[in-house]
């Protein structure tokens, strides 16, 4: 599950499945920078329905191959990375670092302000090979203004559906694209200025790693949680797409 796929086919999930000797089935999915959280919901649903016992969610983000280095809005603070998460039923889980998925929530709304353009599809046309429509582009300021209220409202409604309030959350692990965006989203939720403890940022070390960003933030900043404490993993990306996963330390 990734925003920046290595290839269209064969599915990378099937290659990973073969490499690790896993059974069952695998498939690739792309919901831009929300791919990881969207995939976690698919994994949780597969466990609940009984179609899978254990799911490995992998997020290989090769962002640099898609970037436009001549456009200030589209080349800065991106990084290549891969993350992975295991989702399985509580009665078979063996890890000592265990978290309960209290709930997941997804939403999409079409926007053209972030897009990865035609690329290889228009190679057959008689066009400039360096034309701007062949690589990633975005209108960053519009994205900021539109996504912040959407993300805050999404998280708030998700928590309310679970009978929880934003102020009851120990931490928010958000999509790692912009420091100001993350701080403003959480400030809208809790009504106060936001520091690194409440909404940790990993941009200075890893850069913007698309769908992997919120998972890296979770990995790097969860060890101090006590049993029963809760947090929200949330990512938002092109589409627009927003996915949230509410978790509790066991």
Image (cartoon, rainbow, N blue to C red):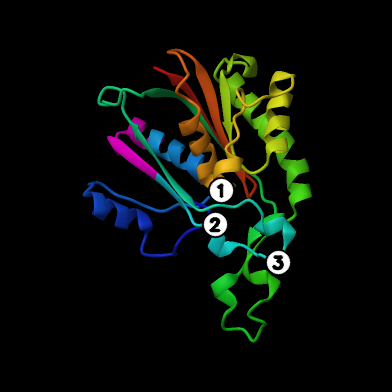
Magenta residues (range) = 45-57
Q: Tell me the quarter of the image containing the C terminus.
A: top left
Q: Dividing the picture into quarters, in which one does residue 214 lie? A: top right
Q: CA distance from mark 3 to mark 1?
A: 20 Å
Of marks 2 and 3, which one's residue comes earlier in the chain?
2
How much space separates mark 2 and mark 3, taking CA atoms? Answer: 15 Å
Counting from the top left corner in percent of width and height, residue 23 is at 22, 47
Mark 3 / mark 1, whichever is N-terminal: 3
- For marks 2 and 3, give the one nearer the viewer: 3
The picture quadrant where one finds residue 45 is top left
Callout 1 environment at 10 Å: few (<14), some (14 to 19), or many (20+)? many
Tell me the residue at 54%/64% (across/down).
Answer: 65
Answer above or below: position of 157 versus 50: above
Q: Is residue 242 visible?
A: no
Other residues around mark 2 within 10 Å, as few (<14) / some (14–19) / many (≥20): many
- Circle 2 sits on which residue? 63
Query: What residue is pinned by disc 1?
Result: 210
Height in image: 73 above or below 219? below
Is 183 magenta? The answer is no
Residue bearing the label numbered 3: 70
Q: Are marks 2 and 3 in contact (CB under 8 Å)?
A: no
| Residue found 63% across the figure and 25% down from its top | 157
Quarter of the image where one finds residue 189: top right
Whichever of callouts 1 and 2 sits on the residue coming sooner in the sequence is: 2
Q: Residue 19 or 206: which is nearer the viewer?
A: 206
| 62 with respect to 140 (left or right) | left
Local secondary structure at mark 3 = loop
Q: Are marks 1 and 2 in contact (CB under 8 Å)?
A: yes
Callout 2: SS:
loop
Q: Which numbered dot is residue 198?
A: none
């Amino acid at each position: 599950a990734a925003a920046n796929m290595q290839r269209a086919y064969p599915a990378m999930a099937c290659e990973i499945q073969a490499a690790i000797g896993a059974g069952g089935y695998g498939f690739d999915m792309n919901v831009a920078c929300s791919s990881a959280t969207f995939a976690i919901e698919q994994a949780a649903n597969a466990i609940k329905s009984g179609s899978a016992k254990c799911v490995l969610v992998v997020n290989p983000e090769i962002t640099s191959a898609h970037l436009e280095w001549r456009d200030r809005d589209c080349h800065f603070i991106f990084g290549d990375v891969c993350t992975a998460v295991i989702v399985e039923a509580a009665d078979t889980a063996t890890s000592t670092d265990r978290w309960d998925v209290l709930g997941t929530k997804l939403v999409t709304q079409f926007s053209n302000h972030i897009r990865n353009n035609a690329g290889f599809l228009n190679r057959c046309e008689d066009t400039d090979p360096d034309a701007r429509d062949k690589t990633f582009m975005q209108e960053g300021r519009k994205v900021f203004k539109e996504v912040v209220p959407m993300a805050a409202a999404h998280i708030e409604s998700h928590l309310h559906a679970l009978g929880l309030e934003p102020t009851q959350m120990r931490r928010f692990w958000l999509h790692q694209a912009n420091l100001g965006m993350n701080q403003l989203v959480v400030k809208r939720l809790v009504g106060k200025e936001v520091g690194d403890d409440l909404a940790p940022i990993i941009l200075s070390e890893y850069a913007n790693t698309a769908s992997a960003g919120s998972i890296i933030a979770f990995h790097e900043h969860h060890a101090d949680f006590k049993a029963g404490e809760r947090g929200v993993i949330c990512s938002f990306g092109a589409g627009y797409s927003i996915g949230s996963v509410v978790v509790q330390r066991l």
